[in-house]
């Protein structure tokens, strides 16, 4: 595999960039579809999409920089030059910015948040395929039949990027169903966040590790925190709406 898809003169087009663009395009159409399905002003949702796209890019970059803040404090210019994105940073930033947007336009936050449930696994599929084609975020050495060699791996390793792609493909139809017929506002997003974070926690044991905080990397700690918030919320809300 090679990270560069093709070149136009001296300009090199990377697979990661192409697949990132696929994420934004698919997110736009998914958000618009669910807005129309649930009778929400599509124009407001389209505007929210563009706001979320910008804030998500900023948040994902911050999520990759913050764990190494000491290094970037000494090398501030590399904040803009070194590669790296963090999906949890994007998710958190989009949820915060989205809150202020929907409040300003008198929309229902959790109803709109449910539209994003299918976007999460779709985006993860494209991004992890980009990581795979870029030869990054692979797992530890293994002799399993599906082990793969990457340019920098030296030996056959777990293609952990493809494990995450497969997990997201499995999650997607559930997220779509939950978003299409949510039992209450937040029903789809809370479930998708919980399942996605639980899977992410376990799969992060078999991928390239960043700095450890005790036995876990930062992304695992964030995934556990999301699970600790979403699971009780799901149980409480499910019980409350069953009693109504």
Image: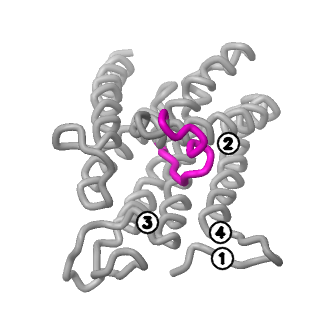
Q: Residue furthest bottom?
A: 145
Residue highlighted by disc 3: 136
Q: Is residue 180 visible?
A: no
Quadrant housing residue 235: top left
Residue highlighted by disc 2: 31
Q: How crowded is the residue under tag 1: few (<14 C-alpha within 10 Å), some, or many (20+)?
A: some
- Nearer the observer: mark 4 or 2; the answer is 4
Quadrant housing residue 232: top left
Q: Which span is picked out in magenta?
A: 73-87
Disc 4 to disc 3, C-alpha distance:
13 Å
Helix, strand or loop under label 4: strand
Residue highlighted by disc 1: 5
Which dot marks residue 239?
Answer: none
Return the disc, 4 or 2, that comes first in the chain's sequence.
4
Return the disc, 1 or 4, that comes first in the chain's sequence.
1
- Nearer the observer: mark 1 or 2; the answer is 1
In magenta segment, residue 136: no
Please indicate whether residue 13 sits to the left or right of residue 72 in the image.
right
Q: Nearer the viewer, residue 150 or 79?
A: 79
Disc 1 to disc 2, C-alpha distance:
28 Å
Disc 1 to disc 4, C-alpha distance:
5 Å
Q: Are marks 1 and 4 in contact (CB under 8 Å)?
A: yes
- Nearer the observer: mark 2 or 3; the answer is 3
Quadrant housing residue 102: top right
Give how far across and how far down residue 42 sits, in percent: 78, 35
Residue highlighted by disc 4: 14
Give how far across and how far down residue 195 sits, in percent: 35, 44
Give how far across and how far down residue 176 sits, in percent: 52, 48
Return the disc, 1 or 3, that comes first in the chain's sequence.
1
Helix, strand or loop under label 2: helix
């Amino acid at each position: 595999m090679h990270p560069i898809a093709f070149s136009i003169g001296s300009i090199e087009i990377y697979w990661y960039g192409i697949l990132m663009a696929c994420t934004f395009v698919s997110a736009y159409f998914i958000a618009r579809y669910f807005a129309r399905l649930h009778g929400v002003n599509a124009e407001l949702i389209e505007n929210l999409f563009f706001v979320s796209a910008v804030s998500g890019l900023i948040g994902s970059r911050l999520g990759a920089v913050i764990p190494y803040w000491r290094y970037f404090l000494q090398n501030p210019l590399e904040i803009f030059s070194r590669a790296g994105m963090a999906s949890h940073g994007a998710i958190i930033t989009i949820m915060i910015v989205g809150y202020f947007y929907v409040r300003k336009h008198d929309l229902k936050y959790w109803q709109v948040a449910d539209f994003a449930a299918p976007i999460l696994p779709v985006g993860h599929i494209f991004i992890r395929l980009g990581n795979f084609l870029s030869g990054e975020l692979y797992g530890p050495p293994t002799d399993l039949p599906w082990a793969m060699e990457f340019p920098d791996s030296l030996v056959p390793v777990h293609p952990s990027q493809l494990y995450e792609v497969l997990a997201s493909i499995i999650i997607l139809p559930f997220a779509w169903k939950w978003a299409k017929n949510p039992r209450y506002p937040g029903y789809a997003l809370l479930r998708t966040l919980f399942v996605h974070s639980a899977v992410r926690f376990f799969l992060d044991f078999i991928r390239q590790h960043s700095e450890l905080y005790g036995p876990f990397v930062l992304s695992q700690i964030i995934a556990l925190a999301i699970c600790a918030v979403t699971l009780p919320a799901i149980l409480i809300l499910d019980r409350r709406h069953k009693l109504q």
